[in-house]
Image: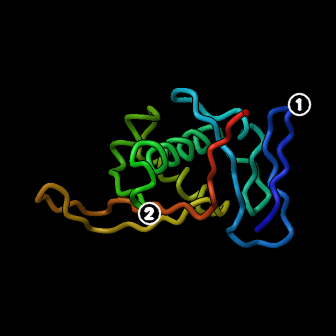
Amino acid sequence: MRPVAFDFLTNSCNIIKKNSNNNDTIFYNFIGNIIPPEWRKITGDNGKALSKTSKQLLSFIVFRLHIYYNKDIDELQESYQLYEDKLNVGQRRVRQCLVELRDAGFIEVENRTIMKDNVKLRNVPCIKLLKNFQHYNEK
């Protein structure tokens, strides 16, 4: 497991990289529907900073998996339409952000055909988190 340095003065989260495995711990503290301030300078395994929309999408994915579903499911199976509506962007931008997050090593994305409410849905992105996201409490 890689150590995570959390700077309390600047309120930023830095992942210390020694090698490229996916056991990083990333802290978050959600207050409403915004990007956690700890993620201001978050970078991926490729060393690139994430775009604002990618951070919003990652925040929404972590929120859905950890808070909405209470960690009961391992991967998120939601349509592109949900992400488009929540982020107010088009499907093309959602796909670009998913590719950016995948290349940065935060998620694993696979398009599948699933059955939901007796309806067959094709090309539904199944998103699995590769990093360890932990809730941060100031106590």
Q: Is residue 92 left or right of residue 47?
A: left
Kind of residue sitting beneath label 2:
Asp
**Position of the C terminus by quadrant:** top right
Give the residue displayed 34% in from the left and 52% down from the top.
78
As displayed, is residue 97 above or below residue 138?
below
Provide residue 65's location: percent of width, then percent of height: 45, 51
Kind of residue sitting beneath label 1:
Leu
Mark with earlier residue (1, 2): 1
In this orientation, which residue lies closer to the viewer: 95 or 58?
Answer: 58
Provide residue 55's location: percent of width, then percent of height: 62, 42
As displayed, is residue 130 above or below residue 19?
above
For label 1, the residue is 9
How far apart in space, not on screen, are marks 1 and 2 (Cα)? Answer: 34 Å
Provide residue 118's location: percent of width, then percent of height: 11, 59
For label 2, the residue is 74
As displayed, is residue 50 above or below residue 74?
above
Give the residue displayed 36% in from the left and 49% down from the top.
80
Q: Pointers 1 and 2 in contact (CB under 8 A)? A: no
In this orientation, which residue lies closer to the viewer: 136 or 103?
Answer: 136
Give the residue displayed 49% in from the left and 63% down from the top.
128
**Quadrant in the picture for residue 130:** bottom right
